[in-house]
Amino acid sequence: MRIVLLGPPGSGKGTQAKLMQEQIGIKHIATGDLLRAAVAERTELGQAAHAYMARGDLVPDALVIGMIGQRLRQDGIARSFLLDGFPRNVAQAEALDQLLTGDHLALDHVVSLDVDREEIVQRLAGRRTCTRCGAMYHVRFDPPATPGACDRCGGPLVQREDDREETIRARLDVYDRSTAPLVAFYRDRGLLRSIDGMGSAADVMDRVLKEVGQRH
């Protein structure tokens, strides 16, 4: 089974990807992890990508597509995977089609997690990080025993810049603009599976597995 997982920041993509890997044995491929590994290993593509990342620029489509292509060719992984963070635009989606067509394969499903915007803002804006040990908390879902202090080391908890409400809303606007054509691209091909992403992780996972035919 070959699946693409879509969803805005804070929609729970990472959690759902991990659960799917555990429950149905599908290989999770996260673009961010691929980029970081390629940079750390100083591969040719990794060094090229690092030059852009160091400047704070987006890594060009050609480099990302190259990394995805290399990963899909490893150990026959192209026959079963869950892609998270790729494709991000129609050009990348078309390139993915070409990669799979070369192996006489195609996508089976594109799962889109739909979460209320205000819920996403609350999820992300409530995160707090320990400045000393890096432990993560949430003021609503996973608060520390003592407000403002880390349970592990006692260090102060802070809200990261990218978790501030105005930043989150700007990120969501960018996501909406960039992915709207991608959602339409996959809807037109009959591959889009829109999933209600509200509720517990287990409930959302149950909906996803039913939609992709892995649970009745």
Image (spheres, rainbow, N blue to C red):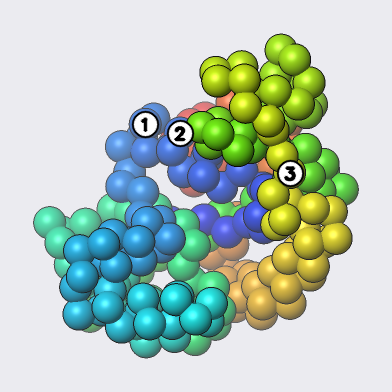
Q: Residue at x 78, y 62 (%)?
A: 167
Q: Residue at x 55, y 34 (%)?
A: 132
Judged from the image, the secondary structure of the residue bearing numbered disc 2 is: helix
Q: CA distance from mark 1 to mark 3?
A: 31 Å
Can the viewer see residue 200? no
Q: Nearer the viewer, mark 1 or mark 3?
A: 3
Position of 198 relative to 68 (above/below):
above
Given residues 98 and 119, the one toward you in this image is: 119
The reply to whether dot 1 and dot 2 touch (C-beta < 8 Å) is: yes
Judged from the image, the secondary structure of the residue bearing numbered disc 1 is: helix
Quarter location, residue 6: bottom right
Q: Which mark is residue 22?
A: 1
Q: Residue at x 73, y 65 (%)?
A: 171
Q: Is residue 189 left or right of residue 204?
A: left
Residue at image mark 2: 19
Report x, y in % for residue 89.
56, 79
Q: Residue at x 61, y 75 (%)?
A: 182
Q: CA distance from mark 2 to mark 3?
A: 27 Å
- Looking at the rendered structure, the kind of residue marked 1 is Glu
Q: Which mark is residue 159?
A: 3
Q: Is residue 129 left or right of residue 106?
A: right
Report x, y in % for residue 190.
57, 67
- Looking at the rendered structure, the kind of residue marked 2 is Leu
Mark toward the start of the polypeptide (2 vs 3): 2
Report x, y in % for residue 68.
31, 70
Q: Which residue reaches farthest left?
A: 75
Quarter location, residue 49: bottom left
Q: CA distance from mark 1 to mark 2?
A: 5 Å
- Looking at the rendered structure, the kind of residue marked 3 is Gln
* Disc 3 packing (10 Å; few <14; some 14–19; many ≥20): some
Q: Is residue 178 left or right of residue 30?
A: right
Mark toward the start of the polypeptide (1 vs 3): 1
